[in-house]
Image: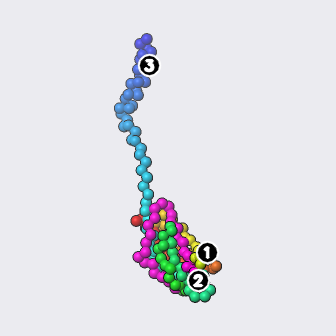
Amino acid sequence: MRKVLRWAVLPLAVAALASAALPAAAATTTTSTTTTYTIELISLTCNKKQTTVGKDRPYLNIDGTREFGPVEMGKGDTESLVGRTHDFTGSSAVMELFEEDSGVDDFLGNVIVNDTESGAGVQVDEFDHLNGAKYTIVYEVNPA
């Protein structure tokens, strides 16, 4: 009987020593942090206008919010956007360029701004979706 008790007690003693010698596992808590980024707009250049007569009247929306325009622009015109910013959270934001018309406005294209662009310096992209219209946007993405 003693041998049976000795073998039964030994594993319990080892377990007790192990739990006393080792720290308890830390409780893991998951905290969800969402980083906010700021798109700092720099300029918009018309390389080729959408309308055949007169000037375009482009405007820029970011995630559905009007951030610029409409203004009259012709081929070669550049509008400064310095001082215009847009904050976004998550992994991306969508910039959309439209040309104002008397009827339905024309969609000139979109640019996806990714969180991975944050801190990467000045970015240059193009809107070139409709009828050969071509606009260049210059911007920078930084943590807010």
Task: Specify whether residue 49 is painted magenta.
Answer: no
> Which element is circle 1 on?
loop
> 13 or 79: which is nearer to us?
79
Residue that badge 3 annotates: 7
Q: Residue at x 41, y 76 (%)?
A: 83
Quadrant (top left/top right/bottom left/bottom right) for the C terminus: bottom left
Q: Secondary structure at mark 2?
A: loop
- Quadrant of image for the N terminus: top left
Q: Quadrant of residue 47?
A: bottom right
Identify residue for label 2: 49
The three-letter amino acid code for the residue at tag 2 is Lys
Dot 3, crowdedness within 10 Å: few (<14), some or many (≥20)?
few
- Residue 58 versus residue 27 in the image, above or below: below
- Pick whichever of labels 2 and 1 is earlier in the sequence: 2
First in sequence: mark 3 vs mark 1: 3
62 versus 57 height, above or below: above
| Disc 1 residue type (three-letter) | His
Sooner in the amino-acid sequence: mark 3 or mark 2? 3
Position of 36 with respect to 101 (left or right) is left
Q: Which residue is mark 1?
A: 129
